[in-house]
Image (spheres, rainbow, N blue to C red):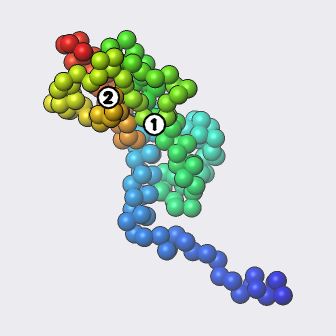
Amino acid sequence: MLGTIKATMRPIRFLHALALPARRALGKLGSDLKNARLRRRLSTTLVAERAFLNRKTLRKIEMGNAGVSMGAYASVLFVLGMTDRLADGLRNSGALVADARVRAPHILSLKFPKGIPEGFVERLAAEQVYVAPRLGRIRISPHVYNDEADVDHFIEVFRKLAGCGL
């Protein structure tokens, strides 16, 4: 009987049931991840090893395959993350940077001893640096399309403005 039931069941085709906007979003995310990897001049072998994946799964992620787990996507995002570079560049800038052990891998939160200085977020925005003020802190969330030049620009602008009375 089991063989009969199994033989009559059709394979699940969830990819076709996935809404078109969701498929497009995954395709864009995959493309952005691939472009980020290429901009950083990282091989598929290296990124796959760091993300604890095989190259075949990384290739599926870069194609936006919906059959790959969100955990695998998150691992690649972490590997390509820029928060450590930001944290290193912002140490001794006048803002307090949380230790890597206690922060999320994709978000950096800066605390100011006397609160966020008046107009600081606006001065950053005037320099094409965008942050989110949250509960007396500045939240920085680099995206996969940001590269090392973006991070270096952020650090340079932040240090310049912080030196003007942080």
Q: How crowded is mark 2: few (under 14 residues within 10 Å), some or many (20 or more)?
A: some
Q: Which residue is drawn at 26% across and 34% down?
A: 130
Position in image of residue 109 (x %, y %) = 39, 29
User: Looking at the picture, which amino acid does disc 1 mark?
Assistant: His
- Callout in the foreground (1, 2): 2
Q: What is the quadrant of the N terminus in the image?
A: bottom right
The correct choice, above or below, for 136 with respect to 114 in the image is below
Q: How far apart are marks 1 and 2 (CA)?
A: 19 Å
Say what secondary structure mark 1 lies in. Answer: loop
The correct choice, above or below, for 84 with respect to 65 in the image is above
Q: 115 or 121, which is in the foreground?
A: 115
Q: What is the quadrant of the C terminus in the image?
A: top left
The correct choice, above or below, for 130 with respect to 152 in the image is below
Q: Decide if residue 48 is on the left or right side of residue 115.
A: right
Which numbered circle lies on residue 70?
none
Q: Which residue lies furthest to the right in this view?
A: 1
| Residue identifier under label 1 | 106
Q: Which residue is drawn at 47% across and 57% down?
A: 64
Answer with mark 1 or mark 2, whichever residue precedes in sequence: 1
Q: Decide if residue 69 is on the left or right side of residue 136.
A: right
Q: Residue at x 22, y 29 (%)?
A: 121
The quarter holding residue 91 reads top left
User: Looking at the picture, which amino acid does disc 2 mark?
Assistant: Gly
| Residue identifier under label 2 | 136
Q: Decide if residue 134 is on the left or right side of residue 105.
A: left
Position in image of residue 124 (x %, y %) = 21, 28
The quarter holding residue 83 reads top left
Q: 149 or 138, which is in the foreground?
A: 138
Q: Which residue is drawn at 33% across and 35% down?
A: 134
Position in image of residue 155 (x %, y %) = 31, 21
